[in-house]
Structure formats: C-alpha cells, structure tokens
C-alpha cells in the first residue's frame, strides 16, 4: 500500500515530459530586451539630468562672478532695466538650450530603426 | 549532473556580460520543470507570469550566480520568492485550478489544495521533482529539519486522503 502510494505520488507530482516551449522562451526574450531598453533609457535620463544640473550651476556661478565685477556693478546702478533685460535674455537662451536636449532621443531612434 | 551545471555556469557567465542568446538557452533548459512546479503551486496563468518574472530576475542577477549550487536550485529559489511576493500582492493565487483534461490530476490537485503553501512546495520539490532535502531547504529558505518534518507531514496528509479515496 505504502509503495503504491509513493509510486502514485512521484508520478503525479513529476513535471510532465515535453519539448521546450519556444513561445515561452521568446516571451522571456522580449521581456529581457524591454528591460534592457528601459534600463538604458533610465541611465540616459539620469545622465542628462546630471549634465543639466552641472550646466545650470556653472551658468549661475558665471553670472554671479560677472555681476560682482566693479564695471558691471556700476552699469547695473546706472541702467538696471538693461541689465535685467540681458539677464532675462540669457535665462531664455538657457531654457531653450536645455528644453531642446532629449537624453533618450538617440536610444529611441536606434531601437525603432531595428 | 556536474557537467550539466558546468554548462549552466558557463552560460550564466555569458549572460552576466549581456549575452541574450546564452540566456535563451538557459530558459529553454529550465522552463519546463520550473513552470510545472509553479503551475502545481497555483493557477496556471499566474504560474507563467511568475516564471517570466523569475527568469527576468535571473537575467538581472546573472552576475551573482557563482555555481556553488545547481543553476536550477538558484532559479527555483528566485521563483519561490516571486511566488511569495505574488501571494502577498494577491492572496487568491493559492487556489489550484483543476484541469479536467488531465486524467487523475483532479485527485492530486485536491490533495495539494488541502496542504499549506510550504507543505505543497516541499512535497512537490522532494517527491515530484527529485530534489534532495537540503537542496529543497535551500530553495525555500527553510532549515533542513523544518523541511524534513514539513515533507513528512504533507506526505501523511496526502496518504490519508489517498487511502480514503481508495477505500471509499
């Protein structure tokens, strides 16, 4: 009885014999490719963000350094409106420059052309 | 068996450097027992999702596989953790689907459905898939003694149910 039961149990619980499921393998491959793509895109976004932060910090330091020079300070006192306009112009240029930068654009182009 | 694991280790090392063809070979080799185990643990559709998630995690963590255990042991332990995560997210997946097309499986499914999650997993791995107690304990993250007593308890429960069905 016990042997019969052991026999029944091992047969009933064993993984059924069959050929490898290629469709399943392909599904996993697709998921892996997608995962790789997302990981690459995430790292590009982080890198882009880092570049932008460093760029903005460098510009801010540069602007402060220029504003601290005596000639610019004197000009600011004489014609503050022109200086404000110049600053606004520079700020707009910075915004335009960074908004046109898309960190994942190359990757998307490369993936879609495959 | 050692040769097979050497082959798996070599493939896994290739996977660690991003070789997706090597990974496809590993998936092809190990999907059958892994999916069979997961399907017996819960509903078949969820089982395939969990198997996919386990393979994806194995892909990401390929560099961590050092060959000290069989690749299938390592993979099954990943799948077991995925299964536990799934249970935490959706407790309903413990329900075992009956497959009427497969003769004799209703009785087995009925037996398995009466076991706890740990009992079912221990019994399946040791009695159905032929893993040693220590390998199964490592896969399920259980102390060896606990696993042995869990398997014995599960077998006793199944034997009682089976005897009842034979006599009734």
Image: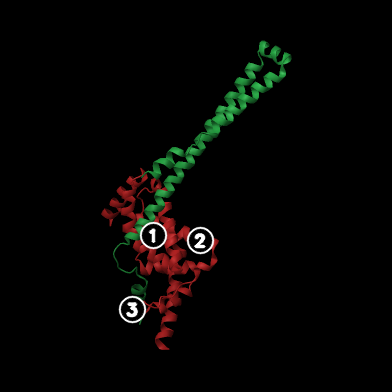
Residue B131: in sight, yes or no?
no
Q: Which tint was used for chain A?
A: green
Quadrant in the rendering for residue B137: bottom left
Rendering coords of residue A14 (x, y %): 34, 70
* Among the 4 quarters of the image, the one containing residue A93: top right
Evaluate whether label 3 is on the same chain as label 1: no
> Whole-percent x and y of residue B72?
36, 57
In the figure, residue B123 lies in which quadrant? bottom left
**Whether residue A60 is situated above or below residue B31 in the rendered picture:** above
Tell whether label 3 touches label 2 (CB within 8 Å).
Answer: no
Circle 3 marks a residue in which chain? Answer: A
Q: Badge 1 sits on which subunit?
A: B
Q: Which chain has been coloured red in this picture?
A: B
Q: Determine the CA span between mark 2 and mark 1.
A: 23 Å
Which residue has dot 1 on it?
B135
Relative to B13, say whether B98 is above or below.
Answer: below
The residue identified by callout 2 is: B86
Marked residue nearer the N-terminal end (2 or 1): 2
């Amino acid at each position: 009885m016990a042997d019969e039961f052991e026999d029944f149990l091992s047969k009933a619980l064993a993984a059924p014999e069959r050929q490898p499921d290629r469709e399943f393998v392909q599904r996993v491959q697709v998921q892996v490719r997608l995962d790789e793509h997302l990981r690459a895109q995430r790292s590009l976004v982080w890198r882009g963000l880092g570049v932008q932060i460093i760029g903005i910090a460098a510009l801010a330091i540069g602007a402060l350094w220029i504003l601290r020079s005596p000639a610019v300070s004197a000009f600011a006192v004489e014609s503050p409106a022109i200086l404000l306009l110049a600053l606004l112009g520079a700020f707009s240029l910075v915004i335009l420059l960074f908004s046109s930068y898309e960190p994942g654009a190359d990757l998307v182009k490369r993936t879609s052309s495959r | 068996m050692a040769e097979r694991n050497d082959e798996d280790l070599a493939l896994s090392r290739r996977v660690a450097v991003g070789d997706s063809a090597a990974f496809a070979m590993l998936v092809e080799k190990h999907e059958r027992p892994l999916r069979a185990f997961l399907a017996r643990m819960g509903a078949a559709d969820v089982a395939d999702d969990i198997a996919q998630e386990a393979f994806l995690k194995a892909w990401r963590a390929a560099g961590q596989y050092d060959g000290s255990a069989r690749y299938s042991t390592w993979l099954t332990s990943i799948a077991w953790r995925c299964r536990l995560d799934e249970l935490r997210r959706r407790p309903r997946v413990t329900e075992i689907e009956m497959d009427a097309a497969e003769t004799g499986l209703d009785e087995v499914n009925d037996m398995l459905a009466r076991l706890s999650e740990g009992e079912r997993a221990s019994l399946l791995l040791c009695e159905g898939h032929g893993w040693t107690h220590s390998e199964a304990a490592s896969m399920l993250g259980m102390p060896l003694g606990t696993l042995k007593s869990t398997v014995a308890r599960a077998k006793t429960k199944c034997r009682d149910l089976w005897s009842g069905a034979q006599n009734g």
